[in-house]
Image (cartoon, helix red, strand yellow):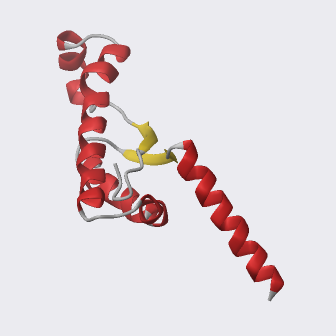
Amino acid sequence: MSKDLQSVSIDVALNWHIKPGAVKHIFRKIGEEKYIIKIIINPAIEEIIKAVIAQYTAAQYTAEKIITRRGDVKAKLDEFLTKRVDDIYLVHIRFSDSFREAAEAEMAEYVALKAAK
């Protein structure tokens, strides 16, 4: 939740691989790819995303500032995740429909004012 009480959802795309020396061990302990994703990767990503977003919401960022600081959010996610995985991409940051509509209306008003000048 942002300072302005907007829910924040983030989609990520992740490149990952198992270190060659750990392949046998991981497949014996965990099993096939879908279990690796379910047991190792998804929980790690969720934990890190919650920790990073909490830094922004704890710092009293509004939803708009979280959007405008997308690069900072990605950099923080990279910092934490690259210790565990290869690379991360922020695919989409979603907010509630009401916030999106308000942001679009504000943008339309800004464009109209700029065009009128």
Looking at the image, residue 70 lies above or below residue 43: below
**Residue 52 coordinates in the image, percent (x, y):** 27, 52
> Which residue is situated farthest in the bottom direction here?
117
**Residue 31 coordinates in the image, percent (x, y):** 27, 10
Looking at the image, residue 11 lies above or below residue 99: above
Residue 38 sits in which quadrant? top left
- Residue 28 located left or right of residue 3: left
Residue closest to the eye, 16 or 6: 6
Q: Which residue sits at x=47%, y=63%?
A: 64
Residue closest to the eye, 59 or 98: 98
Residue 3 sits in which quadrant? bottom left
Q: Which residue sits at x=26%, y=30%?
A: 43
Residue 47 sits in which quadrant? top left
Residue closest to the eye, 56 or 82: 56
Looking at the image, residue 117 lies above or below residue 100: below
> Which residue is situated farthest in the right direction here?
116
- Residue 112 located left or right of residue 51: right
- The number of callouts visible is 0
Q: Which residue sits at x=63%, y=51%?
A: 101
Q: Quadrant of the C terminus?
A: bottom right
- Residue 113 located left or right of residue 64: right
Residue closest to the eye, 88 or 53: 53
**Residue 92 coordinates in the image, percent (x, y):** 52, 45
Looking at the image, residue 69 lies above or below residue 80: below
**Residue 35 coordinates in the image, percent (x, y):** 31, 14
Q: Which residue sits at x=44%, y=43%?
A: 10
